[in-house]
Amino acid sequence: MKVVLVEDEIAASENLSYLLKTIDPSIEILMVLDSVAGGIAYFSEQNDADLVFMDIHLADGISFEIFEKVVIDIPIVFTTAYDQYAIQAFKVNSLDYLLKPISEEDLEDALEKFKKRNGGTENVNNQLQGVLSLLEASNKSYKTTYLIQRRDELIPVNVSDIAYFYIEASVVKVVTFNKQEYVVNKKLENIELELNPENFLRINRQFIVNKKAVKKLQFHFNGKLIADIEPPFHDRVLVSKLKASGVKSWLNA
């Protein structure tokens, strides 16, 4: 499969290339374009790309401007940190729409959709229904308080006061900014779904952190990062190479 990336952030394009190669080593990245002007010039000429991954926000404008100048009949997967462009994305030849930070699972699903299409055109109504579901999910209400049992007490803890959740020895704990620690009788996976992703992110298998708790990121070997969180944890909090770009994008949003 031959792929073109339209992405102006070097870290994001490198991460996407890495994920694509991880999922399917036979994928060939033909070109990485970083601007509307570059996209217009490239797609004005004949090319043999099978699939395009296109960021919506580019250095010199919005990628939809490309379609005002040229016709692109190649399936496109749009990527962006903002879901406000979802409906517009599906008015062009869109195969899928991925919100940043992009996970390997979502990327795999997008590639699977491409393989199933067999060159045909996916039903536009199905596309729009899918993106409407996405928008509905993005507007859902998130948890604001956890009622936590400690001995014979029930303690309400506001989500805004929580610095991070972590799991250790199969026990999930919550740590607040004022350094209180409680045991939470829930799985980390379920907690992740209950929290607003703008404010909380699962940075590794062990941790879900509040954006305000991350004081800095330190570079580690092999593309990994160390998250300096507050209150401090008793061990290093590592971010894998796979998640590093997504964590940086989340903190930079």
Image (spheres, grey):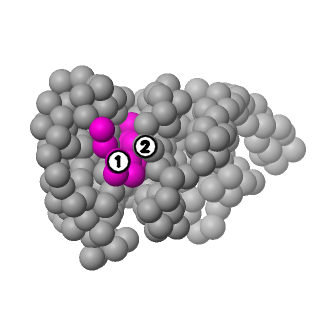
Residue located beneath label 2 in the image:
93
Quadrant placement of the N terminus: bottom left
Tag on residue 73?
Answer: 1
Tell me which segment is drawn in magenta. 71-80
Q: Of residues 21 and 67, which is closer to you in this image?
A: 67
- Amino acid type at image mark 2: Asn
CA–CA distance between discs 2 and 1?
7 Å
Q: Is residue 77 magenta?
A: yes
Q: Position of residue 122 (x, y in %)?
A: 55, 52
Q: Position of residue 196 (x, y in %)?
A: 58, 34
| Residue 138 visible in this rendered orientation of the protein | yes
Q: Of residues 151 and 79, which is closer to you in this image?
A: 79
Q: Position of residue 119 (x, y in %)?
A: 44, 62
- Amino acid type at image mark 1: Asp
Determine whether the residue tagged by mark 2 lies in a helix, strand or loop: loop
Q: Position of residue 54 (x, y in %)?
A: 31, 43
| Residue 17 visible in this rendered orientation of the protein | no
Task: Residue at 31%, 31% (x, y): give it.
Answer: 67
